[in-house]
Amino acid sequence: MAGSLQNNFDHALMRLQPLVQNSIWQRACWNNIIQRGSSAMTGEDWKYTSLAAFNDVDFTSVKPVTMLSTSNLALWKDDGYRLIFIDGKFSPNLSDVIVGVDIQGFDQWLKSDHAIKDAIRPEFISELTDATAKDGLCIRIAAKVSVDKPIYLLHFSHSKAGEVTSIRHHLQLETLASCQLVEHHISSADAQGVTLSRLSSSVADGARFEHIKLIEAASEQYHLAHNDIKTGRDVNVSSSTFLLSGQLIRHQLSTELGDAGCDVSFNSLVLPTSKECFDSRTFLHHRAPHCHSQQLHKIVGLGEGVGVFDGMIYVNQGAIKTDGQMDNHNLLLSKKSQVNSRPKLEIYADDVKCSHGATTGKIDSEQVFYLQARGIPKLLAEQMITKAFAAQVCEKVTLANVRQYLLQQVTQKLEGENDY
C-alpha cells in the first residue's frame, strides 16, 4: 500500500513539475516537496481532501483570456481600489492607482529576503503555490499610513481542464499602518482546472488589518490556498474566509503572534452542497504573552456536501496570559451531508485561558415550532434559522457592501436546500 501511494505521488509530481518556475527560491520550494514525499499527504490532515484526480491530469499553465464580462468589470467598482488579475495575470490597465502605497511586481518581489517569503507552517499546498507562482503583487503600506478605502484583490478565472493558475501575494504593513483588504476569487460558470492562491501578510507593531477572503469557484474547479499572517507587537488583525462554491476547496490560514499585546479575530463560513468538498483549516501560534484571540468557524452542510474544519491553537512556553477561544458550530441541512470537525489545543505555558468548542446537528425543532406558533410557515422558519446561523459570520465583516454581498450569496445558496 505504501509503495502504491508513493508511486501515485511521484506520478502526480511528474505532471506538476513543468509548472515549477526557475528562481532559486521557487526551485527550493519544489525540492522541499520532493524531500517530504507522499508522507506529507497522508493521515488525518488529508483524510477528506483527496487529490487523487491529479494522477490522471496533464497540467499546463493557464492561458489568460483578454476580455472580462460587463458584470465582472463592474464588480466592486467605486467601492475601493481594485487590483485585477485575469487568469493569474495582473491587469494594470484595469486596476487602480493607490496613492501613497508601494506596489511591486512579482519578479521584483522574488529578489527580496527569503525570510519574508517563508511559510509559517510549510506544507504541500504552500510549497506548491510558491514553486509554481507566475504572478502576484507585493503591497507595502508605509508607517502611520492609513489607506482611505479598501483594497480589492480581484481574481477572475476562466481556466480549462488541466490548466493551473498560481498566484502569490504579499502584504507588508509597517508600524501603525492600517488597511482593509478584500481577496476575491470568482470564476466563470464553465471554468475548470486548479487555482493555487497564497497571500502572506506581515503586520508590524501597532498596525491594524482587516482581511476578507471570498472563494466562488466553478462547480468543476479546485481551489487550494494557504495564507499566512505574522504580527509584531500590539496589533489588531481580523480575517474572515468564505468558501462559497467549487468542486473542492482546501484553505489554510496560519498565524504567528510574534510579540505581546496582539488582539486577533479569525472567522470562516463554509457552504458545501451537491458533492462539493470544502476543507477549512487554521493554525494559530501564540508565541508571545498577553495576546487575545477569538475564532468563530461555521459549516452548513447541504445536499451531499462534505465540510471539514481543522483548527489548532498552539501556545508557546512563556506565552503567559494568553486568552484564546475557538468555536466551531455546524449545521446539517441534508441527510447525506457530512461535517468533520477537529478543534485542538496544544499548550506549553502556565497562567493561560484557552478553550475550544464544537457542535454539529440539524435545525432545532423547538426553534421551528416557536416560529410556527407565531404564524410563520415551516419552510420559511427553517430558512430564517439557517440564514441567521450563517449570518453571524457575515456580520463579522465591517465593510457594509461586502457584508451585503455575502448575505445575498448565502441566501441564494441556502434557499430550498433543507431535505430533512
Image (tube, rainbow, N blue to C red):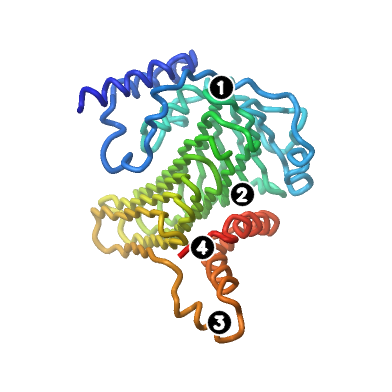
For badge 1, the amino acid type reads Lys
Q: Quadrant of the C terminus?
A: bottom left
> What residue would you read off at disc 2?
178
Q: Earlier in the sequence, mark 3 or mark 4?
A: 3
How far is disc 3 from disc 4 in space, using C-alphas?
17 Å
For badge 3, the amino acid type reads Gln
Residue 167 position in % (x across, y down): 55, 29
> Which of the two discs, 4 and 1, sits closer to the camera?
4
How far is disc 2 from disc 4 in space, using C-alphas?
41 Å
| SS at badge 3 | helix
Kindly check if marks 4 and 1 are in contact, taking CB atoms under 8 A apart as contact: no
Q: Is residue 264 visible?
A: no
> What residue would you read off at disc 3?
372
How far is disc 4 from disc 1 in space, using C-alphas?
42 Å
> Which of the two discs, 2 and 3, sits closer to the camera?
3
How far is disc 2 from disc 3 in space, using C-alphas?
47 Å
Q: Earlier in the sequence, mark 3 or mark 1?
A: 1
Between residue 184 and residue 270, name the one nearer to us: 270
| SS at badge 2 | strand
Q: Earlier in the sequence, mark 4 or mark 1?
A: 1
Residue 376 position in % (x across, y down): 61, 80
Between residue 408 and residue 21, name the one nearer to us: 408
> What residue would you read off at disc 1?
134
Residue 158 position in % (x across, y down): 64, 30
Kindly check if marks 3 and 4 are in contact, taking CB atoms under 8 A apart as contact: no
> Which of the two discs, 1 and 2, sits closer to the camera?
1
Q: Is residue 14 visible?
A: yes
Q: Which mark is residue 418?
A: 4
Between residue 206 and residue 310, name the one nearer to us: 310
